[in-house]
Image (cartoon, helix red, strand yellow):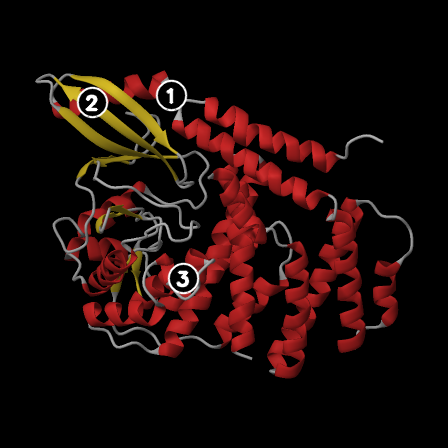
Amino acid sequence: MKPDINIALLNAAQEIINRFSPLIEDEYERSRLGSWGALILISAMKFNDASSSLKKENCDIVKWLKNHTKLRKEELEKFESCEDKNLDQLDQDNQNLREILDKQIQEIQAKEDNVLFREGIYLMRSMHQRRKVSDLIGMLQQQES
Amino acid sequence: MSKDLTSAFLSYYSEFQKKEYSLISLERIFGGASRETYKIILNDDSDKKERLILRLSQDSSLIETEQRTEYLAYSAFQKSNVPVPVLIDMSEENTELGAPFMLMRELKGEAASPFTPNIYAPHENELGEQFWSILGEIAKKKIDSDIYEDFNRETERPFWKNELDKWVKIIHEDSIGIEPILEAGIRHLYKYPPNESEIISMVHGDYRSGNFLYAENKITGILDWEMAHLGDPLEDLGWALSPIWSWQDKERPAYLVKREDAISIWEATSNISLNKDDLQWWELFAAIKGMAIWISAGNEFKSGKNIDPINLFSAWIPGDIHLEIILDILERNT
């Protein structure tokens, strides 16, 4: 079994941050390379879950729309197909679903339906929690120190 | 560093000051994405050292702003209670240095990263007192009439709408995808606007941790005025209080003093009595404006116009944090 891509990225990031960046005398270039190291580190941490997270997010949006809106089920079924989809296809589905979700949230806000809006916030928060990389900021600071 | 810039600068500055100079160093400072900033040390013909800061416009910058805006804002606060660098020159032409620029004297002190917790310890209380009172000074400063008129020409009323329209336009032009959290936040702001301010202030536009210089327990300079404009003083307060600038210790905005103390200091200095609902509006606005900046950065990066890693960092980390702040504010208001 070969080392995975995320392991390769992780090691590359460590080399950039700890080995190559300190060798650069120019402060601007050293900081710039160090930043690249940190960003590659984030990429490595998120790489493995990118596809499954997107798939889960799409499923969650479809489920929410089915349970909380009057959208026709057939409209949403195309996003639930069992065929294997690559990251680009999943991302395209995600954009389409986000557009549908946004329209629904807009209607809910216009009607001032606070109960349903809270449900919407709950969904959006779970989407954001899964996708965000800002929770890695502490780890980046440790790497830089 | 570019030899072209070095020789162009020496030639320009010698001509400008009518003196001969030799260059000791010219170093670019990492961080800012709106301008290329250089620290320059020169010797003049009597062997006297000069320390300068050069701010050069970039072909592709995060938010397009004119050098003149920043220059006028600095001009408005020369010799005031708001510490700013002494200005030397400004040009909106490409002739001297290949891009519009602003030149000023270097101030003592260092700038911190806004994302590093406890960066100001053990002087956070003294610096906090100064940070929030200087913001109060900015809010109450009577602006010279020529400078005021210059800014006033570009300002429509109400202030909140002028600013919100501007940033929402950037969001919708530069967004790579649809973000329902952000759109919900924008709709909330339009639906529940604040009172129009009776006080017209010079708004710094990016007053926060990281945009001031400090030497131990003293703030020595307020920097980065390129987004300055006339408007509601609560705009700066909402931006400076945003939890993004103290993400790992939200009780102490900017990693300085506690929120309630910060507001008290600001009120006492500015002589403005705070409307809490209006401040809450400006705090949500701050997150939306932040998102516009981070989205714009992500667009620059994705399109290849500017692949400085600061643009990718901005789109990823602060972008995530501001979305979370929007969710928190919406949830509190529902």
Front residue of B145 and B13? B13
Q: Quadrant of residue A65?
A: bottom right
For marks 1 and 3 on the same chain, the one whose residue lies earlier in the sequence: 1
SS class, disc 1: loop
Q: Name the amino acid, label 2.
A: Leu
Cα–Cα span, label 1 and label 3: 38 Å
Look at the numbered discs 1 and 3 and tell me whether their residues touch, using CB distance below 8 Å. Answer: no
Question: Quick check: A42 left or right of B227?
Answer: right
Q: Quadrant of residue B334?
A: bottom right
Marks 2/1 same chain: yes
Question: Quick check: A77 left or right of B225?
Answer: right
The residue most toward the front is B122
Residue at the disc numbered 3: B163
Picture layout, residue B88 above or below residue A52: above
Cα–Cα span, label 3 and label 2: 41 Å
Q: Quadrant of residue A131?
A: bottom right
Question: Quick check: A105 left or right of B222?
Answer: right
Picture layout, residue B88 above or below residue B44: below
Q: Name the amino acid, label 1.
A: Met
Callout 3: residue from which chain?
A: B
Residue at the disc numbered 1: B1
**Residue in the image at 41% along x and 39% along y:** B31
Residue B42 numbered mark, or none: 2
SS class, disc 2: strand
**Residue in the image at 21% along x and 39% along y:** B108
**Residue in the image at 28% along x and 33% along y:** B54
For marks 3 and 2 on the same chain, the one whose residue lies earlier in the sequence: 2
Q: In which quadrant will I find the N terminus of chain B?
A: top left
Callout 1: residue from which chain?
A: B
Q: Name the amino acid, label 3.
A: Glu
For marks 2 and 1 on the same chain, the one whose residue lies earlier in the sequence: 1
